[in-house]
């Protein structure tokens, strides 16, 4: 009850009432506070909407992030460890601080020489995604159809791809596989653009983010637990305010990253933080990703165009595959920024919103719902079987249109287009919409 009251108070002070109270969500599941460190939760939607009468799935186009991983930079482990060890050598580390140091040491040891690599949980996530894909859309994977898979050349992405393909092979031994990881495909698999980067690196953008982060970081309570049995004057003499915020953020990163490793079964760092502190971490991280990958006004509203080449590739490969009788599936494996920016570029589930950092929750711009570890977008195409002709309003017969629905993290998503039925859209409409998006980039004149 106390936690709920604290969450409600923090919420009311900062924002009007919104459709989803993230603070209460974190109280129920602290892993949410990790945003892009959140382990893949699996689909919330267990039963998908039935396709219109006579339609069956026959092609899937996909982009997915690698699964759960260790932290990427050795400093993520070494920096907080060094600070705590120095405090211990000076005799100002509390009993709590020494206990935290031991847990940091365990995480550091577990990840030694495995920086950024896929964890066992990450492999398991991708096997589950593959299994559900085959179970949900069995018609796509019948017989000896081809599954064409590509990955960035990062080992965690390659292993994510291979785990999905191995699961599919076990379920459907007759499938044929093509898989590759090459610089050749990086122009659309993991693209960066100097112009877009220049908008993110402007001083006013950095200043805005720094101010937002400082307003949503209060390390004092945690510092008082770590150093000299709570004597704040000792902490102030040992670490500057910026250094305190740095250590605080490092420890929260370790706390939220722990969910992706096998140590999650043995220990936690969440006991060091209150729900409000974890919620503030979520706010800071959510704002950072929106500013750098979403349609944020301060970064020109154009950051999602980083995925224009991926979008064009999806259209081109669909055009090629849909003329085939049995096209199978096209799978792509990369990183969270691609899933996030592509979702924003297409306005999937209204993620193309343009708003202020303080209004993200009002707009339901919730990054953990877009890009947990192993996040993925699936474009599932349907064709009408049997008699593929249908009558128009004028009584003429025409070929039934190809339909498509989009799954974000295996949940049916919306598009800003007229639906045929439920989450099903005409591919012709979606394709035209995608091409209009690409045409708008040309008007920016930065190609």
Image (cartoon, rainbow, N blue to C red):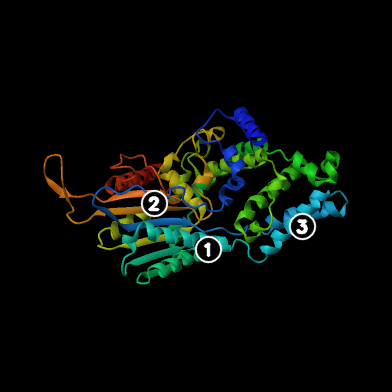
Seen in the picture, residue 143 relative to 266 is either above or below; the reply is below
Residue at position x 83%, y 39% in the image? 232
Please tell me whether mark 3 sits on a helix, a strand or a loop. Answer: helix
Which quarter of the figure has residue 172? bottom left
Label 1 crowd bin: few (<14), some (14–19), many (20+), radius 10 Å: many
At 61% from the left and 54% from the top, the residue drawn is 259
**Foreground: 371 or 188?**
371
Q: CA distance from mark 2 to mark 3?
A: 46 Å
N-terminal label among 1 and 2: 1
Q: Does dot 2 land on a helix, a strand or a loop?
A: helix
Q: Are marks 1 and 2 in contact (CB under 8 Å)?
A: no
**Label 2 belongs to which residue?**
311
Q: How many marks?
A: 3
Q: Which residue is mark 3?
A: 102
Q: Are marks 2 and 3 in contact (CB under 8 Å)?
A: no
Which of the two labelled residues, at mark 3 and mark 1, occupies the earlier sequence position? 3
Q: Is residue 305 visible?
A: no
How far apart are labels 1 and 2 at the CA level? 27 Å
Where residue 397 sits in the image (x, y, percent)? 13, 47
Percent x, y of residue 345: 42, 44
Any part of residue 95 in sight: yes
Q: State the residue lying farthest toward the left.
A: 395
Identify the secondary structure beneath mark 1.
Answer: helix
In the picture of the structure, the residue carrying the numbered disc 1 is 123
Please state which of the two labelled residues, at mark 2 or mark 3, is closer to the viewer.
3
- Rendering coords of residue 183 (x, y %): 47, 64
Residue at 76%, 39% in the rendered image: 221
Q: Nearer the viewer, residue 341 or 40?
A: 40
Dot 3, how many residues are within 10 Å of its Cα: few (below 14), some (14-19), or many (20+)? some
The tag on residue 278 is none
């Amino acid at each position: 009850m106390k936690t709920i009251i604290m969450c409600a108070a923090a919420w009311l002070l900062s924002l009007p009432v919104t459709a989803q109270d993230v603070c209460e969500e974190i109280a129920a599941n602290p892993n949410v506070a990790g945003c892009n460190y959140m382990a893949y939760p699996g689909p919330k939607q267990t039963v998908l909407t039935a396709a219109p009468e006579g339609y069956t799935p026959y092609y899937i186009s996909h982009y997915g992030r690698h699964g759960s991983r260790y932290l990427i930079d050795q400093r993520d482990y070494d920096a907080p460890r060094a600070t705590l060890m120095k405090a211990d050598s000076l005799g100002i580390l509390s009993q709590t601080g020494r206990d935290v140091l031991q847990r940091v040491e365990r995480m550091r040891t577990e990840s030694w020489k495995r920086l950024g690599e896929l964890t066992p949980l990450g492999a398991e996530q991708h096997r589950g995604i593959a299994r559900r894909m085959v179970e949900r859309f069995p018609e796509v994977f019948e017989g000896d159809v081809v599954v064409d898979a590509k990955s960035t050349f990062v080992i965690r992405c390659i292993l994510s791809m291979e785990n999905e393909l191995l699961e599919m092979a076990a379920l459907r031994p007759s499938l044929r596989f093509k898989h590759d990881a090459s610089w050749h495909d990086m122009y659309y698999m993991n693209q960066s653009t100097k112009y877009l980067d220049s908008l993110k690196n402007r001083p006013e953008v950095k200043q805005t983010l720094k101010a937002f982060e400082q307003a949503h970081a209060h390390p004092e309570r945690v510092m008082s637990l770590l150093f000299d049995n709570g004597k704040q004057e000792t902490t102030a003499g040992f670490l500057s305010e910026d250094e305190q915020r740095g250590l605080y953020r490092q420890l929260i990163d370790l706390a939220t990253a722990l969910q992706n490793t096998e140590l999650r079964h043995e220990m936690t760092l969440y006991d060091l933080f209150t729900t409000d502190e974890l919620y503030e971490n979520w706010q800071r991280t959510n704002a950072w990703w929106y500013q750098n990958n979403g349609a944020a006004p301060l970064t020109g509203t154009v950051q999602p165009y980083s995925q224009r080449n991926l979008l064009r590739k999806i259209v081109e490969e669909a055009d090629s595959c849909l003329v085939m009788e049995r096209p199978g599936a096209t799978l792509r494996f990369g990183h969270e920024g691609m899933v996030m920016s592509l979702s924003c570029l297409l306005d999937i589930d209204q993620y193309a919103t343009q708003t202020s950092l303080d209004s993200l929750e009002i707009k339901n711009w919730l990054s953990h719902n877009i890009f947990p570890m192993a996040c993925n977008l699936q474009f599932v195409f349907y064709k009408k079987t049997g008699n593929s002709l249908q009558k128009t309003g004028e009584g003429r017969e025409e070929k039934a249109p190809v339909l498509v629905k989009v799954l974000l993290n295996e949940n049916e998503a919306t598009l800003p287009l007229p639906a045929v039925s439920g989450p099903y859209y005409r591919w012709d409409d979606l394709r035209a919409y995608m091409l209009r998006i690409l045409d708008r980039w040309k008007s920016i004149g930065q190609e």
